[in-house]
Image (cartoon, rainbow, N blue to C red):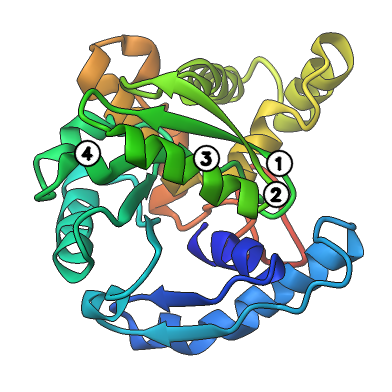
Amino acid sequence: MGTAIAALAVGHGHPVRLIDHSPEACATAPERIGLHLRTARMMGALPAGVSPGELTTAGTPGAAAGAAAVIEAVTEDPKEKAAVLAELAAAVRPGTLLVSNTSGVPIEEMADAVPHPGDLVGVHFMNPAYLIRTVEVILGPRSGAGAATAVRELLAGLGREGIVVGDGPGFVTSRLLHRMLNDAIEVVREGRAGPETVDALMRHCIGHRTGPLATADLIGLDNLADSLRVLHERTGDAAFRPSELLLDKVRRGELGRKSGRGFYEYEEITP
């Protein structure tokens, strides 16, 4: 998701510094972002006549110094997110917009990790970020008015419409969607129907555009499992306990599109 968000910003002409502790991730990021950009252009998802913004990479959070806004996009692990946000907040000026891209970790839960909680807001970009134009925006109890204005301006500069919701596990989209995805996986585990049948029924009878199993593959089965754990631990609702079939696939490295195999097989791996 980090490279997809970076591609969205670069494609709208904004300079981006992508930061990752992994030298390998930094080395491969330009190629992956280039692939996103080519796909977005072919699908008419970027503004015409706009020169791409400059892309640079760095390996330490200190490289965020001077940024107008910082977007954290690590895995759905609350402790890891809080640690990264703390490092980024230490590098930037007070008043700099801090954004956590998350599908379910409450913003208030991470607010204590930063010295100025009013600077922190949440966003939930949908995958792929460079195609889906609506973004869920989460304002925590301590998110300030300045940050709320800044995130709206940031999204407008990316050609995105932000819809603001209140804080809480899963917000709105994941609270509703992840329960359905988990139930769909359970239907497959029980042998009631295969992935193709479940998705066909949901597409043609219910109007779900891609089907829940194909959606799970697009999200990434490891990301889905992490998000479900967050929801289960914070709500106590058994419907959010990750399906054993989902966990089995994650253990086998069948993570969906990004690994080439999930509930379906893919000839091209999505970066």
Q: Nearer the viewer, residue 70 or 174?
A: 70
Mark 1 and mark 2 in contact? Answer it, CB < 8 Å: yes
Residue wearing tag 2: 159
Residue 160 drawn above or below residue 171:
below
Q: Is residue 132 left or right of residue 157?
A: right
Which residue is label 1 attached to? 133
User: How many numbered circles does the render carry?
Assistant: 4
Residue, x 25% and y 53% (percent of image)? 95
- Circle 3: residue type: Arg
Q: Considering the numbered disc 2 on the image, is that residue within a helix, a strand or a loop?
A: loop
**Which mark is first along the chain, 4 or 3?**
4
Residue 225 in the figure: left or right of residue 46: left
Q: Nearer the viewer, mark 1 or mark 2?
A: 2
Q: Nearer the viewer, mark 3 or mark 1?
A: 3
Q: Residues within 10 Å of mark 2 (few under 14, many from 20)?
A: some
Task: Give whichever of discs 3 and 1 has the lower sequence position.
Answer: 1
Dot 3: few (<14), some (14–19), or many (≥20) neighbours within 10 Å? some
Q: CA distance from mark 1 to mark 2?
A: 7 Å
